[in-house]
Image (cartoon, coloured by chain):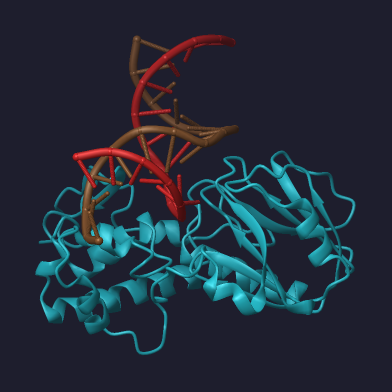
Chain colours: A cyan, B brown, C red
Amino acid sequence: MPELPEVEVLRRSLEPHVVGSRIEKAHVWNPDLRERLDRRRLSSSTRGRRILAVRRRAKYLLLELEGGRTVVVHLGMSGRLTLAPAGSDRELHEHVTLVLDSGHRLRFRDPRRFGLILVLRTANLERDRHFAHLGVEPLMEGLSGDTLRQLARGRRAPVKSFLMDARVIVGVGNIYAVEALYRAGIHPTRSVGRIASVRWDRLVGAIQETLRDAIAQGGTTLNDFADAAGESGYFRVSLQVYNRQGHPCGRCGAVIRRIVQSGRSTFYCPGCQR
DNA sequence: CGGGCGGCCTGGAGGC
DNA sequence: TGCCTCCAGGCCGCCC
């Protein structure tokens, strides 16, 4: 489900309601997520601890707790994290519930179980194997086209795959890679080593604009994305090419195409993207 | 080594 | 109605 904008929207919606709350208890209904959840570790490191901050790194949501621990949540493809009133019933595919002293429950629901919850020492976070290899944050202050151009040197991958490579740049998944390339007017199959400097600047600008617009509109809800309050995002109506094969391009009228790259759908306008 | 592919899961959509 | 295939917002490990 979620790329950077969705996780950021979730983070912002959660923050004002959980920071300062204490976690009374963690229920693990099903530990079999992408990686098996360590029940004891989750329980012992969350019980009675206050939530100090809600952060994000790449597509990971981070609940920073007292005692130097951080609960790491990844939504995979179909994960949701919602804040519900006390007493409400457990939902289908709700695998973990954090009971807060405010009376609310933080529910992790994930039908496909590609998601992940783990507990790390806050101080070791960046050295953990889930984080150590991660590349630049696309919304980082001062990110330039040149930074990406350097990383692309000597590589022959198609630009779309390059944008989705978390070792290079994080948070950009299938939807936003496709949309950013459309905005930048770059063909998704273009080899990344053969992109001119000026186009790198335009591409970075397009990525940042696309992500910021998506955040402002509450993210993209295709099927099941929702923020902590269960609200859908509305960036879907702003998608220019994603899932629009056969429709005319809004800019030039050419018919939008769908191709497959590395097993993932790519959509582009043959008129605007060269 | 870089890059592509299959596998991990469930469920929704569409064809017949 | 059912049964089949295909597809899905991520990520990792394996293979060439």
* Residue A105 in view in this figure: yes
Residue B12: % across, % down:
52, 33
Residue A112: % across, % down:
57, 40
Residue A100: % across, % down:
85, 65
> Quick check: A53 left or right of A142?
right
**Residue located at (9% from left, 68% from top):** A194
Looking at the image, which residue sits at the far bottom? A142
**Residue located at (63% from left, 79% from top):** A123
Q: Is residue A247 above or below residue B6?
A: below
Q: Is residue A265 above or below residue A56?
A: above
**For the C terminus of chain A, which image quadrant?**
bottom left
Q: Is residue A57 above or below residue A175?
A: below
Q: Is residue C6 above or below residue A68?
A: above
| Camera-nearest residue between A22 and A246 | A22
**Residue located at (36% from left, 67% from top):** A167
| Camera-nearest residue between A177 and A132 | A132
> Quick check: A195 left or right of A259?
left
**Residue located at (28% from left, 54% from top):** A241
Residue A67: % across, % down:
79, 78
| Camera-nearest residue between B2 and A16 | B2
> Quick check: A274 left or right of A12?
left
Count numbered badges in the picture: 0
> Quick check: A274 left or right of A75?
left
* Residue A84 in view in this figure: no
